[in-house]
Image (spheres, helix red, strand yellow):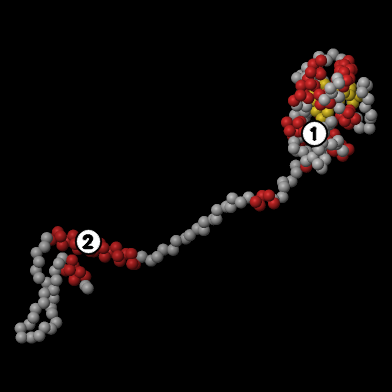
């Protein structure tokens, strides 16, 4: 159908058929009957058809446009099982004895926390650094941390600490001022069954530079060793004897019982001996 026919059909104008006189029907001529129409209507219809035709022509002529598709990265898996198989981070560089001997208090505390100088670093739950007055003239020295000390990260906590405070108070020494408490070892020695044991010579030697640095920074006048292991360990190779005064550098050393043993003493005999030890330490220390 031509474009003109479309216009005519839309306006309701169809072909007229005429039969020739005396003849059979043959081809017909299309005659447009005169129709009176509003010029404005005709113009509106023509414009509408022309607009539709232009849109269709443009759509057909427009070539398909290729759209670049950026691949969307797959979401990262929440599975972190690979982390369990990852190699452990390398250990911090271990300080030499000379390095430790040059540390200040803060550096010493940080070095003890990261120490891996012996195998105790593989079994420990924490380290126990000394506590108290870092300018104290009195040093209370135990051998190695107990389970309670390891758990709390504090030397002689709880009832042990209270008893030690009372012992010092009895000889007119304020535990809150002028007293420092520490261990020869900073980690708790355990056997394969997880039970506490005595430290080995290797473990004691590995940890000794830390205690020596504490001693150099503190410079105490009097050292009271708590328990037989501390008394024996402070001067390796020397047999300690209770009731005597030994020397470690410029400090006087007096041995007595560990507060934990005194708490378990039901007879009172150990407490009486401990009182004699403290009186000896006090007289040696002076005013």
Instruction: Name the quadrant containing residue 260.
Output: top right
At 30% from the left and 66% from the top, the residue drawn is 57
Q: Residue furthest bottom?
A: 23
Q: Nearer the viewer, residue 242 or 263?
A: 263
Residue 124, image x, y percentages: 77, 38
Q: Is residue 135 visible?
A: no
Numbered circle sitting on residue 186: 1
Instruction: Name the quadrant containing residue 247.
Output: top right
Residue 59 lies left or right of residue 85; in this view the side is: left
Instruction: Name the quadrant containing residue 235.
Output: top right
Numbered circle sitting on residue 150: none
Residue 276, image x, y percentages: 89, 17
Upstream in sequence: badge 1 or badge 2: 2
Which residue is disc 2 drawn over?
Answer: 48
Residue 37, image x, y percentages: 11, 62
At 18% from the left and 66% from the top, the residue drawn is 10
């Amino acid at each position: 159908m031509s474009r003109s026919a479309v216009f005519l059909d839309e306006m309701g104008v169809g072909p007229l058929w005429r039969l020739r006189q005396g003849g059979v029907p043959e081809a017909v001529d299309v005659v447009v009957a005169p129709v009176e129409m509003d010029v404005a209507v005709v113009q509106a219809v023509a414009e509408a058809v022309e607009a539709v035709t232009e849109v269709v022509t443009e759509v057909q002529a427009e070539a398909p446009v290729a759209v670049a598709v950026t691949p969307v990265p797959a979401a990262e898996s929440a599975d972190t099982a690979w982390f369990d198989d990852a190699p452990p981070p390398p250990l911090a560089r271990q300080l030499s004895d000379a390095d430790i001997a040059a540390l200040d208090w803060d550096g010493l505390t940080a070095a003890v926390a990261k120490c891996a100088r012996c195998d105790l670093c593989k079994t420990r739950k924490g380290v126990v650094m000394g506590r108290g007055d870092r300018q104290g003239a009195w040093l209370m020295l135990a051998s190695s941390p107990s389970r309670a000390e390891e758990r709390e990260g504090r030397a002689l906590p709880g009832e042990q600490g209270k008893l030690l405070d009372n012992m010092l108070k009895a000889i007119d020494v304020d535990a809150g001022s002028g007293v420092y408490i520490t261990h020869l070892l900073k980690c708790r020695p355990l056997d394969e069954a997880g039970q506490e044991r005595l430290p080995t010579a290797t473990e004691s030697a590995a940890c000794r530079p830390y205690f020596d640095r504490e001693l150099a920074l503190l410079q105490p006048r009097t050292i009271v060793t708590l328990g037989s292991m501390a008394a024996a360990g402070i001067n390796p190779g020397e047999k300690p004897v209770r009731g005597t005064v030994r020397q470690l550098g410029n400090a006087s050393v007096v041995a007595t019982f560990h507060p934990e043993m005194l708490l378990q003493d039901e007879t009172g005999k150990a407490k009486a001996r401990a009182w004699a030890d403290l009186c000896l330490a006090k007289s040696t220390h002076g005013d």
